[in-house]
Image (cartoon, grey):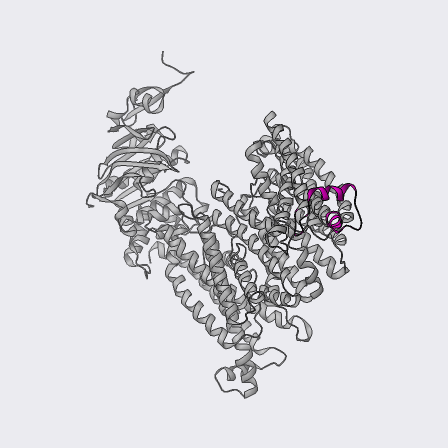
Amino acid sequence: MSVVAVATASRRSRARTVTLVLFAAVLVMSALSLAVGAYSVSLPDLLATLVGQGDSKNEFIILRLRLPRLTMAVLVGLAFALAGALFQSLLGNPLASPDLIGITTGASASAVFAILVLGLSGFAVSGFAFAGALVVASTIYLLSWRSGIAGYRFVLVGVGIAFMVQSTLGYLLTRADVRDAQGALVWMVGSLSGTLWAEVAVAAISIGILIPVVVLLAPQLRMLQLGDDTARGLGVRVNVARVLLLGVAVALAACATAAVGPIAFVAFVAGPIARRLVPGISLVPSALIGVLLVVTADFASQHLLPGGTQVPVGIITGAIGAPYLLWLLATRRSRGEA
Amino acid sequence: MTESHTLTAAGLSLSYDGAPVIDDLDLVVPPGSISVIVGANACGKSTLLRGLARLMKPQGGSVQVDGRDIHSYPSKQLARLVGLLPQQPVAPAGITVADLVARGRYPHQGWFAGRSAADYAAVAHALEQTSTADLAGRAVEELSGGQRQRVWIAMALAQEPEILLLDEPTTFLDVTHQVEVLDLLMHLNRERGTTIVMVLHDLNLAARYADHLIVMAQGAIVASGSPAEVITAETVRTAFGMESLIIDDPVCGSPMVVPVGRFHHLG
Amino acid sequence: MSRRVLGLVLLAAGVVGVVLISLAFGTRQIEFPVVVDAILAPDPTNNDHAVVRDLRVPRTVIGLLAGAALAVAGGIMQGLTRNPLADPGLLGVNAGASLFVVLGITFLGITAASGYVWFAFAGAAAATVLVYAVGAGRGGNPTPVTLTLAGAAVTAVITSVITLVLLQNLDTLNQYRFWSVGSLVGRELSTVTVVIPFLVIGFVLAAIVARMLNVLALGEDVARGLGQNIVLARVLAAVAIVLLCGGATSISGPIVFVGLVVPHIVRRFTGPDYRWILAYSFLLGAILLVLADVIGRLVVQPTELEAGIVVAFLGAPVMIALVRRSKVGAL
């Protein structure tokens, strides 16, 4: 084998090992999510039910309640994590993330508007959330364009817009009846409870379309990492590539937010955690970590509090994300990179 | 071995943020040779190189490769002809030498490419040419300045370009590494016939290594030709505003500029 | 020099003007002579007088104080961090204040705005310390982008916690949501007077720190070389920021962008001397916030738009324009 292949092989094998371990972890957590609960199912029964051989009670619990929820958790974990990893790579800053730059906030505000002002619910709200994210993202994009997109401008404009949107949200909350406001608040936090197969289907289709696009664009992302000039020198159409990749990232975040609300921090932490395990941009490990985070958080959200009270999953991911964020900021190298 | 490809600029005008830097410049780069662009700070030499490298869109005139405007080429096709090493290139954290060099194969890879045999061969050859094969598994950020620069050149080589543009490839290197990098470029030119165009800030190194020297001042070319023709006290005075004495480099015979300042002078 | 003094005089006149506007305009139109009477010779049976004294005077005073405090605090932050995008709201100070207010309402049953004061204060202080510590990282100054993001991230973290509490507690939500949009209404003057001493100390410290900021602006190494005690400067500046932000947030709720925008506008006229920047910011901040409050009263009659919301909608475009125009954030 050539010297090149040998050198890349060792790095590849580490990435492969990490990926396998993460995948195994996801499987374990998934099994736990399906099996454990107020009504626990044993492993053999679980497997039987999954292939259609279970009794009707198990079938109801697992196939109608838990499996759709788990599937949704996997889908949005994937989507959020990829969106975050793409953002962080494109904008050149590990702290940049669709939740911090106002995109998911825009989705929330839009959804809350739909709920409180238009009195909508269900899929209509999701539609508004999706549209809201896209509108905010396009606005940020247009406002930060100045013969090309510079990462820092995008981020700063995003933060400014985020605060403006948050102000709007605050306004909407003051004008509504307090109970409606609390209902809207739940939406703002992100929750997987009561997931229906119909919702899963919509999410699966929308996210499923976007994943292959990411795969297709991944080589261009690797080139962009080398800096704009070098990337141009290698024949990448830098501005086009960046728009497309940002667009896909926004779409992923928008779809996921529209489905379950803005689950905090998954987009933000998945990429950095993956990078510590496997150096370089690693989209697959990031995605797996996102899935693992959401599945685990959802499991915790159902079983953390006694008596069947559920904590919205967004709170749990926030509780994980918060200390991690602070640690990340505090241990940042003084040059301002992480 | 390689057919010679021509790189020319005609009536080229470039500006930054509305302020014109280069106006109506004509340039013919002799194919298969080493051309070096020199000049004082802010004379427009980097701007010219960036214009040649398609990093800037001209406000007037055009840059042409093989008679065709570079902006009309599909990006990847142009990248197979022209390679670029920009100033202070950025390597992502944790990337290994082999990986970085392999990225230079991008212009040759299609949408669904894996690594082909040709890719592996090109990368291995590039590593060999730049004597970086033994560094293949190391992280780029751990390398010394000279090693890193050689690795970036290897990446540009893996691209297998006919024309290689380099923007100040030696600026942050100590003298040993400067000579190392320039020797490598000379070797590439002599061995493969790659046309090399680079911006250098050191006039004497430029005189030593260039086949063709282009001196710029205030956005225009004030002299071009072989070093022997171009480097005169007069030219140095015009371009750098400095008095000097020109002697022959005792090592290789090219013209050498000895500056005359306030405290050290002739006589 | 005299041009700058002239500017200061004009701004002072502007403050007076804005106060008069604030007292006269609103959902209820009141003539100037009546306003004057209300202040000098109040008639307890006159409704107009009541409106002026009990509603408009307090909110005007709050607007002046909070606006001045936020603007000066923003100016100090920008000088201290050499970050043109520093603003107490953007950097999470408001979030800290909000968190403590929520905790106060929920766990200690505080219901009146006067009660919030101390909590807001403590929260703003805590957040300032946190962002400061985090922003300093392992030494050296973070880039503007990183600091802004750090503030956004800290705000996001705190917001998660706040949301958690609000979800469990309908009453808290009911009270908090009004406070959180940044309103100048609903506080009595007596509440405000409690905070005034802290604001005064804050302003005095600001005046002292201004000179030091001029030296710090040259970079730490140069500043040391010029004999500036960096630690002292940082501590004094931080204390000033805490007092001013804490005080402002406690009386008006969290308001973004004032600290960012005012020093920037001011800088165009004063140049980079922080003594002038802070002095001008003091006056312009007061004017802008009161003006925002008046706009809020007039735009959606017969209801009102809170001053904080008006400022957010006016301030965001300014911030974006700033980002577009300058080379801010380039590493």
Of the pair B17 and C150, the residue shown nearer to us: B17
For this orientation, the residue located farthest to the top is: B267
- In the rendered structure, the answer to whether residue B264 lies left or right of residue B28 reads right
Of the pair C177 and C140, the residue shown nearer to us: C177
Of the pair C116 and C8, the residue shown nearer to us: C8
From the top left corner, tell me how far across and down residue B207 is, in percent.
Answer: 29, 29
Query: In this view of the protein, can residue C137 be seen by the observer?
Result: no
- In the rendered structure, the answer to whether residue C124 lies left or right of residue A265 reads right
Magenta span contains residue C36: yes
Magenta span contains residue A323: no
- In the rendered structure, the answer to whether residue C37 lies left or right of residue A48 reads right
From the top left corner, tell me how far across and down residue A161 is, in percent.
Answer: 53, 52
Residues in magenta, as a range: C25-54
From the top left corner, tell me how far across and down residue C210 is, in percent.
Answer: 65, 33
Question: Measured along the vertical axis of the image, is residue C227 above or below residue C58?
Answer: above
Give the total of numbered labels: 0
- What is the quadrant of residue A229 in the picture? top left
For this orientation, the residue located farthest to the bottom is: A55
From the top left corner, tell me how far across and down residue A306 is, in percent.
Answer: 68, 73
Of the pair C46 and B18, the residue shown nearer to us: C46
Question: Measured along the vertical axis of the image, is residue B264 above or below residue C306?
Answer: above
